[in-house]
């Protein structure tokens, strides 16, 4: 019988795609198709792009509440965000620090108290501003005055009263430190004493 011998000519290689076929004719199926990645932070996932001739879908993980751990737990692209600040102490001892730095929870340490001075600040850190500063006194007799040493963070000046004429009233009216000492007052006081 007069058959004709046939020649087998291989097909041309093509770009490998995910189909379970050796498209590029190198003896391997679905190779070199890499991975599929999705999500950010703690939600990031990576899967093989092709498994058994089937293109894979990458599904990101679920976000969780952000905690101080150097990880983007809530998957918004920022690590340790929204954790705010910590405050401690009162008055001049008050301090505020970032709650989380570099994935490490921070400790807030209050400042050290100092002696209270008149400045509108709670220097001794007891919760009261300008306390314990007492009073200032000035003048003698009827001119004596007393004022709070500090008001509204401002040191006060004590101004004595104005002297008046001395009379017989058992008061140092002329503010010289002696009661009923004026010549005009002496006869009146002497008459009263004799009665």
Image: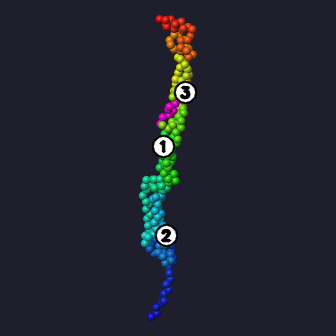
Query: Does 152 appear above or below 67?
Result: above
Which residue is the site of mark 3?
A: 156
Residue toward you, 18 or 107:
107
Badge 1: few (under 14), some or many (20 or more) residues near its Cα, within 10 Å? some
- Expressed as whole percent of the image width and height from the top left, the position of residue 83 reads 47, 49
| Quadrant for the N terminus in the image | bottom left
Residue 118 is situated, as x and y percent measured from the top left of the image, at: 54, 32
Check residue 33 in the rendering and tell me which mark sits there, or answer none.
Answer: 2
The region drawn magenta spans: 127-133
Task: Point out the frontmost of discs 2 and 3.
Answer: 3
Q: Quadrant of residue 182?
A: top right
Q: Is 65 in front, or is 111? A: 111
Which residue occupies the foreground of this view, 172 or 156?
Answer: 172
Q: Residue at x 45, y 66 (%)?
A: 47
Q: Residue at x 42, y 58 (%)?
A: 62
Residue 37 x/y as whole percent:
48, 63
| Labels 2 & 3 near each other (Cβ < 8 A) | no
Q: Is residue 35 above or below residue 10?
A: above
Which residue is drawn at the image coordinates 53% and 21% (left, top)? 145
Predominant SS of the magenta segment:
loop
Q: Which mark is residue 88?
A: 1
| Mark nearer the N terminus (2 vs 3) | 2
Q: Mark 2, residues whose alpha carbon is within 10 Å: few (<14), some, or many (≥20)?
A: some
């Amino acid at each position: 019988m007069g058959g004709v011998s046939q020649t087998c000519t291989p097909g041309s290689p093509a770009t490998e795609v995910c189909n379970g076929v050796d498209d590029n004719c190198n003896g391997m199926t679905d190779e070199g198709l890499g991975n599929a990645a999705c999500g950010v932070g703690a939600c990031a996932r990576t899967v093989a792009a092709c498994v058994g001739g089937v293109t894979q879908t990458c599904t990101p993980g679920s976000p969780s509440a952000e905690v101080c751990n150097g990880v983007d737990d809530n998957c918004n692209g920022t690590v340790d965000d929204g954790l705010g600040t910590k405050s401690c102490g009162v008055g001049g001892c008050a301090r505020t620090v970032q709650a989380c730095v570099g994935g490490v929870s921070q400790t807030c340490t209050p400042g050290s108290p100092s002696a209270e001075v008149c400045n509108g600040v709670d220097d001794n850190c007891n919760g009261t501003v300008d306390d314990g500063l007492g009073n200032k006194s000035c003048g003698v007799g009827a001119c004596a005055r007393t004022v709070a040493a500090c008001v509204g963070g401002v040191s006060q000046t004590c101004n004595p009263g104005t002297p008046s004429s001395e009379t017989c009233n058992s008061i140092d009216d002329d503010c010289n430190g002696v009661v009923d000492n004026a010549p005009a007052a002496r006869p009146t006081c002497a008459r009263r004493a004799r009665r």
